[in-house]
Amino acid sequence: MIHSTIYVSFRFRRFYIWGKKENTRKNDLILSTWITPTDRFQYHILQADRLQFTHTFAAMNIFRLAGDMTHLFSVLVLLLKIHTIKSCAGISLKTQELYALVFTTRYLDIFTDFISLYNTVMKLIFLGSSFSIVWYIRRHKIVRRSYDKDQDTFRHYFLVIPCLVLAVLINHKFTFKEVMWTFSLYLEAVAILPQLVLLQRTRNIDNLTGQYVFLLGAYRALYILNWIYRHFTEPHYVHWITWIAGIVQTLLYADFFYYYFQSWKNNEKLQLPA
C-alpha cells in the first residue's frame, strides 16, 4: 500500500523527503510520480534556497573572515580611542571623509540587493562607523579640539577626481552602480595617504593610532590572500580591477609596516621618518 503523504524536513542544509511505501523509509531524495505539483513547487523553493546559501558562503574562507574581522577591529580601535580618551590626535579627518565616501558609493545596493545577513550587517557597521567618526572629529565639542587641522592639510579632492575619471574609463560594466563600486575600489586604495602623511609630520604616534593603521593595512593584506585562495579553488575567478587596487593599497602601507615592526621588535615608541 502506498501512502500519499510526504514530509519535507530541513536539517543542516540537506533535504530529505520521507515517503512511506510498504512501511519502508527512504533516506534518499524521492521524486516519484505521486508527488503533487504543489510538492514539486515547494521542493524547488527549498532547492533554490539551498543554492543561495551555498553561493553566499562559497566565497567565505578563513582569509576573508580574518580580513573582515581585522577591518572591524580597526574601526573599533579608532572608536575606542575617540570615545574613551575623547581625542582624535593623530587621526586624519581627510582620510575618514574619504572612507565615508568609499562606503557610501560601494554600498548603494544595501537596500535593493540582499546577499546575506552577514553581508548586510557588515555594510551597516562600516557605513555607520565611518560617518560617526567624521561627526566626532567635526562636531563633538571635546574631540574636535584635539584635531590638528594645521598638520592635516593633504588635498584629498585631488584623489577623488582622478579615481572617478578612472572608474568611468575602466570598469566591469558601464552602469551607475558598477561605476560607483569601481570608484570605491580605486579611492579606497589611496584613501590612507592623508593619514600616512599626517603621521610622518607628527612623527610621534600613540599606540591606538598605530594599531588602527596597522589593522587597516593587515585587513587588505589578508584580502589578497583571500583572492589568491579563491583563484585556485574557484573556477574562472578573475577580478583584475579589485586585485590591482588591493595590491596598490597594500604597497602604500609597506613603509609603515616596516617601522611598526621595528618599533615592536625593539620595544620602542613608533615613529615615522619625516
Image (tube, grey):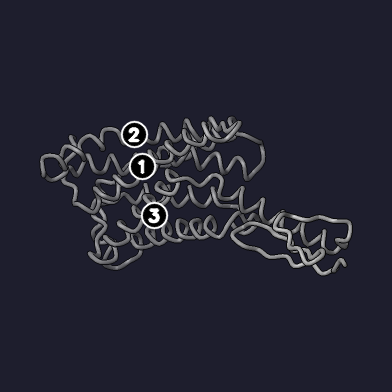
Quarter of the rendering containing residue 203: top left
Amino acid type at image mark 2: Leu
Amino acid type at image mark 3: Leu
Tag 3: Cα neighbours inside 10 Å, few (<14), some, or many (≥20)?
Answer: some
Q: Earlier in the sequence, mark 1 or mark 3?
A: 3
Q: Secondary structure at mark 2?
A: helix
Amino acid type at image mark 1: Ile
Disc number at residue 252? 2
Coordinates of residue 7 in the picture (x, y in percent): 75, 67
- Tag 1 near tag 3, CB within 8 Å: no
Indicate left or right for 85 with 125 as reference. left
Indicate left or right for 184 with 217 as reference. right
Residue under label 3, please give it.
72
Residue at image position (20%, 52%) is 207
Residue at image position (62%, 57%) is 13
State how far apart marks 3 and 2 are (Cα). Answer: 20 Å
Tag 2: Cα neighbours inside 10 Å, few (<14), some, or many (≥20)?
Answer: some
- Tag 1 near tag 2, CB within 8 Å: yes
Residue under label 1, please give it.
192
State which quarter of the image contains the C terminus.
top left
Q: Nearer the viewer, residue 35 or 98?
A: 35
Q: Nearer the viewer, residue 187 or 258?
A: 258
The residue mark sitting in front, 3 or 2, is 3
Residue at image position (34%, 42%) is 218
The residue mark sitting in front, 1 or 3, is 3
Task: Work out whether 208 lies above or below 222.
Answer: below
Q: Secondary structure at mark 3?
A: helix
